[in-house]
Image (cartoon, helix red, strand yellow):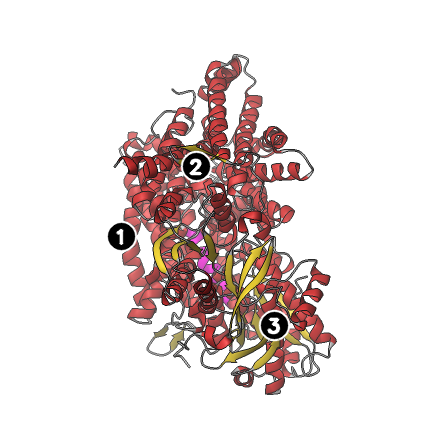
């Protein structure tokens, strides 16, 4: 009898009750975020708002990794490629076309869908482990090219990216205002999360789950897994790119380091520690690790060991991650009542 | 060693009333520098220089009677991390002044953060010309020599010792590597040298032997290289392995051979010449005292990063005392045209682009030590003011 | 034309060979570990680095280079055996073994790299080559140490081949790779074989570290030098194929070496990657099959 998969949502528990536990944890995340915003705003803080916004942006990247790893069963080791792509395209749009947030997002979405399609055509043909290594190689190669391209600022990157202002009829939302941008990004992530969870309930989502569980059988049922995997790949690329597009609005610059393996690796760590397959686990993981890095970094320069050790412990003893263990525990708690 | 108030909310609450009466407490200087990663060796020299200067300034009564307090954060030589840490220091740490960035990407990005927060920063390491040229900023100052100045010193030495030089250029293919080669090529060709070839290898390249055939074929009398760190160790030892450095003068950028990699390069570095703004062998009373003090505390000689970082606190001290306050606009005004004493002699901060002017030296590696073999005056080395923003 | 062949192409080919031998040694350990254990060892580069540092430490206490060369692989084998037993075995029996072991070794790699930084500092260090001087061949000079490298590398590769295909030990390993349960029921001590194979792969990485340290110097992130090319060689050659690792390793390094004569060096990595993608499109499992699967 095949053992249950360690990665991805536990299939043993009854689906309806488990889903509501995950849903509850998702609400809890956003409520906690709003509480944080209230406290920070009252104290007139700027730094922690920006740090939290950054963790949400990288959380978006982690979401895209979770879509591939936790749901489709593909491990991407080069997702930072699309994140960085989105960041650069957004920076160029804001700097040279117009400082408009909707425009930047639209340009990123359109261009990344195309790029994601090309990348997917190259990468999806490979199965399992090869996919991981190809996505790794693709990111390495492209990031090196960007690193050497003068027009993109080469190794120094691009500075002087303006922070856009959104003009709504009644008010102006200035992204340079830290609390405003934080709430904006939070809203965006909530929307993204809701969409993804909805998507998993559709036939398309079921296909992805089926691919993750046992890809070979799918062909016998008359479905071609290749098209679904490609669609998931492009979708994940778009999510990563849209998250990346927000980065220059936050920090006013982009640099090739945004495409490097460290960013891809961190995204995977966020997903595993937070709980793969649950989507909100990616956000929890990103928040947790950003906070941890900031705290540990104040004490020692060797934070890599702490994060690495946490990750190794997680992989060995808690492969389902934070949400992966909290959700069933919550269920058990509720079913006892 | 890294002192930082951890509980952020408590810190913000505690510091808010303090800031209101900030004119009596210590002056806090934030340092965002790579303490981990490939550039940790440079970050170490920066820290040593700053710590020594702060100790000496505080022992002599501080700045306008207030003590200097240094607060460190690790930027991992990554601009994304540098901006985050810089903001932490400015917002939560409430520092009055920032320094410590090493690579030019970080300096530029942190400069932007400084503008947003209305504070000043100074770099003591980054030597990309753009920082005080096309990408200059009113809140960014540079106390170390930039690439153009280093090239001027080296080109001057080369013109006087190598008649009819045939130069081959070998650099790492990234912004710094290419622009350093370009800067020197302009200076050298201006003095009559001939270019016989150019190759750009990937950064972190491990084996340079595939390019040696090409280099040999060009028959250069001088090889100029802008590799740095580990790449230099590999290039130089491999050149020695293949006998490429016989009968050829090897010169390079200031970051090519430094105290961080000199030990590993060993004998293969002998004869290497470069242009720098500082050498421990500068023969002046101030420098001898500085080197002795530095060695006593750190058991290591200072290099250009340590010396320039030492000097930046004296620069800030002089500016604050001239302005009579730590207010950003007053200090900026005071810094423009300021002259201050450093182990290398007097430096002048050019108002037009916030670039420090100083005498430059050509140094040669002999037996593991840098010896001075040439000197160019500040005015001749500095180059034109290309900053149009202010 | 003959001049070009002798003075430009020939030295380039010989150079490519010495680099190629280094790459093959790295790829061999990686492919053996994957071929038998189905484990992608993302920490392979770090074991390579540890081997170099171990040799440095041994030389530091006064041992001559040759002793360090002999002892380091033994030390690394112990480290590898311990790592397999303590860490990798734990995630081995789950269904997503591929992903989990990849992630696990990735995490181990992060920890090891930082440990090296703490223990030895971030600055580069060097081991003096034990053989100096150069030999004249075809009118040009080749450093003797590189010739030694090629010879010893070839000897190691030959030894691995002989052990894998001509000894009982090798037969046991191949049997366990092909069908674990059957091999176990035939009396092959499978978990020992697994741990031993991982140890062997790690020892190979450590050996490469020692052999290459005199020409490539030693620093904490040195493991990253080989990551892309070693994995590409393994993928192109066929994951788990010794023959594949050797042939692909030699061919690819030749391709890079010769192409650097005509195209800008910056394109050599993208070239490699492009070749990898093309090969995978044509033969998704690489050029040759897996260990045990012919």
* SS for dot 2: strand
Q: Is residue A203 visible?
A: no
Is residue A59 magenta-colored? yes
Q: Which mark is residue A242?
A: none
Closer to the camera, C224 or B299? B299
Residue nearest the viewer, comparing C18 with C120: C18
- The majority secondary structure of the magenta stretch comes to helix
Residue at the disc numbered 2: C141
Which residue is painted at 37% across and 39% down in the image?
Answer: A131
Q: Given the current orientation, which residue lies at the most extreme front position?
A: B163
Q: Is residue C103 above or below residue C242?
A: below
Residue at 47%, 14% in the rendered image:
C166
Q: Residue A114 got which mark?
A: 1
Q: Which image quarter: residue B373?
A: bottom right
In the picture shown, does residue A44 fall above or below A145?
below
Residue A182 in the magenta stretch? The answer is: no
Give the foreground label among 1 and 2. 2
Q: Which residues are magenta?
A: A50-63
Residue mark closest to the camera, 3 vs 2: 2
Callouts 3 and 2 in the same chain: no
Image coords of residue B305 (percent x, y): 58, 64
| Residue B364 location, quadrant | bottom right
Do marks 1 and 2 share a subunit? no
Q: Give neighbour class at mark 1: few <14, some 14-19, many 20+ (Cα, 10 Å).
A: some
Task: Find the distance from the CA under tag 1 to the CA under tag 2.
Answer: 51 Å
Residue named by callout 3: B311
Q: Mark 3 — on which chain does it sit?
A: B
Give the Cα separation between the discs numbered 3 and 2: 48 Å
Depth check, mark 3 against mark 1: the one in front is 3
């Amino acid at each position: 009898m095949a053992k249950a998969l360690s990665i991805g949502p536990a299939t043993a528990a009854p689906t309806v009750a488990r889903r509501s536990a995950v849903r509850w944890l998702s609400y809890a995340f956003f409520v906690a975020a709003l509480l944080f915003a209230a406290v920070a705003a009252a104290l007139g803080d700027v730094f922690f708002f920006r740090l939290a916004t950054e963790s949400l942006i990288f959380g978006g990247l982690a979401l895209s990794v979770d879509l591939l790893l936790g749901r489709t069963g593909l491990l991407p080791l080069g997702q930072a490629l699309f994140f960085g792509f989105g960041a650069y395209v957004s920076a160029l749009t804001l700097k040279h076309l117009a400082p408009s947030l909707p425009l930047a997002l639209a340009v990123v979405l359109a261009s990344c869908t195309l790029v994601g399609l090309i990348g997917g055509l190259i990468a999806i043909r490979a199965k399992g482990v090869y996919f991981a290594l190809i996505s790794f190689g693709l990111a390495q190669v492209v990031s090196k090219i960007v690193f050497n391209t003068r027009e993109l600022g080469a190794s120094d990157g691009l500075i002087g990216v303006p922070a856009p202002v959104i003009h709504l009829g009644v008010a102006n939302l200035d992204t340079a205002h830290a609390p405003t941008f934080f709430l904006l990004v939070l809203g965006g992530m909530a929307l993204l999360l809701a969409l993804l969870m909805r998507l998993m309930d559709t036939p398309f989502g079921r296909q992805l789950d089926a691919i993750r569980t046992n890809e070979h059988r799918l062909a016998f049922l008359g479905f071609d897994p290749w098209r679904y995997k490609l669609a998931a790949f492009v979708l994940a690329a778009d999510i990563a790119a849209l998250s990346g597009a927000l980065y220059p609005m936050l920090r006013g610059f982009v640099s090739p380091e945004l495409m490097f393996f460290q960013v891809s690796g961190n995204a995977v760590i966020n997903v595993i520690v937070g709980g793969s397959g649950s989507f909100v686990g990616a956000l929890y993981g990103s928040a947790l690790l950003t906070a941890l890095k900031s705290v540990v970094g104040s004490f020692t320069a060797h934070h890599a060991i702490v994060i690495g050790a946490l990750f190794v412990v997680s992989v060995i003893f808690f492969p389902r991650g934070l949400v992966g263990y909290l959700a069933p525990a919550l269920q058990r708690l509720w079913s006892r009542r | 060693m890294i002192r930082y108030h951890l509980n952020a909310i408590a810190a913000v609450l505690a510091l808010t009333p303090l800031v209101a009466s900030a004119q009596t407490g210590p002056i806090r200087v934030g340092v965002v520098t790579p303490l981990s990663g490939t550039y940790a060796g440079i970050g170490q020299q920066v820290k040593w220089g700053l710590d020594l200067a702060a100790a000496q300034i505080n022992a002599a009564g501080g700045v306008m009677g207030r003590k200097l307090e240094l607060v460190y954060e690790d930027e991992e030589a990554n601009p994304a991390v540098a901006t985050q840490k810089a903001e932490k220091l400015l917002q939560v740490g409430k520092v009055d002044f920032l320094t410590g960035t090493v690579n030019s990407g970080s300096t530029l990005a942190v400069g932007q953060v400084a503008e947003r927060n209305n504070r000043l920063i100074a770099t003591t390491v980054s030597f990309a010309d753009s920082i005080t040229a096309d990408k200059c900023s009113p809140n960014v100052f540079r106390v170390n020599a930039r690439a153009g100045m280093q090239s001027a010193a080296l080109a001057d030495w080369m013109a006087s010792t190598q008649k009819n030089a045939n130069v081959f250029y070998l650099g790492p293919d990234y912004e710094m590597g290419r622009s350093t080669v370009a800067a020197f090529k302009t200076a050298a060709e201006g003095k009559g040298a001939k270019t016989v070839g150019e190759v750009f290898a990937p950064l972190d390249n491990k084996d340079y032997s595939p390019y040696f055939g090409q280099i040999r074929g060009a028959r250069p009398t001088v090889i100029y290289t802008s590799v740095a760190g580990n790449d230099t160790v590999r290039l130089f030892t491999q050149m020695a392995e293949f006998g490429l450095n016989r009968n050829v003068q090897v010169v390079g950028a200031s970051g090519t051979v430094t105290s961080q990699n000199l030990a590993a390069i060993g004998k293969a570095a002998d004869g290497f010449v470069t242009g720098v703004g500082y050498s421990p062998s500068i023969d002046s009373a101030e420098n001898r005292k500085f080197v002795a003090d530095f060695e006593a505390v750190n058991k290591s000689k200072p290099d250009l990063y340590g010396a320039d970082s030492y000097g930046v606190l004296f620069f800030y001290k002089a500016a604050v005392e001239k302005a009579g306050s730590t207010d950003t606009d007053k200090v900026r005004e005071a810094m423009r045209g300021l002259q201050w004493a450093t182990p290398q002699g007097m430096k002048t901060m050019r108002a037009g682009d916030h670039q420090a002017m100083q005498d430059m030296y050509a140094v040669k590696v002999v037996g593991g030590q840098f010896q001075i073999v040439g000197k160019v005056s500040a005015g001749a080395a500095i180059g034109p003011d290309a900053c149009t923003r202010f | 034309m003959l001049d070009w062949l002798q003075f430009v192409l020939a030295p380039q080919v010989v150079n490519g060979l010495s680099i190629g031998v280094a790459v093959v040694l790295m790829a061999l350990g990686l492919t053996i570990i994957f071929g038998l254990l189905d484990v992608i060892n993302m920490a392979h580069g770090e074991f390579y680095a540890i081997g170099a540092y171990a040799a440095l430490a041994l030389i530091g206490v006064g041992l001559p280079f040759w002793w360090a060369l002999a002892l380091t692989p033994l030390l690394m084998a112990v480290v590898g055996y311990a790592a397999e037993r303590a860490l990798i075995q734990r995630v081995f029996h789950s269904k997503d073994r591929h992903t989990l072991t990849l992630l696990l070794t990735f995490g181990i790699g992060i920890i090891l790299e930082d440990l090296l930084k703490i223990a030895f500092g971030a600055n580069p260090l060097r081991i003096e080559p034990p053989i100096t001087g150069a030999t004249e061949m075809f009118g040009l000079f080749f450093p003797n140490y590189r010739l030694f490298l090629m010879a010893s590398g070839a000897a190691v590769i030959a030894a691995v081949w002989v052990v894998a295909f001509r000894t009982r030990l090798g037969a046991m390993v191949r049997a366990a790779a092909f069908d674990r349960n059957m091999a176990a029921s035939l009396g092959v001590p499978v978990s020992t074989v697994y741990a031993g194979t991982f140890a062997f792969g790690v020892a190979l990485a450590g050996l490469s570290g020692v052999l290459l340290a005199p020409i490539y110097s030693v620093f904490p992130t040195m493991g990253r030098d080989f990551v892309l090319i070693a994995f590409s060689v393994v993928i192109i050659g066929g994951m788990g194929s010794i023959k594949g690792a050797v042939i692909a390793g030699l061919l690819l390094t030749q391709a890079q070496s010769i192409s650097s004569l005509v195209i800008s060096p910056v394109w050599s990595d993208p070239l490699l990657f492009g070749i990898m993608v093309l090969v995978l499109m044509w033969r998704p499992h690489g050029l040759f099959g897996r260990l045990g699967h012919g």
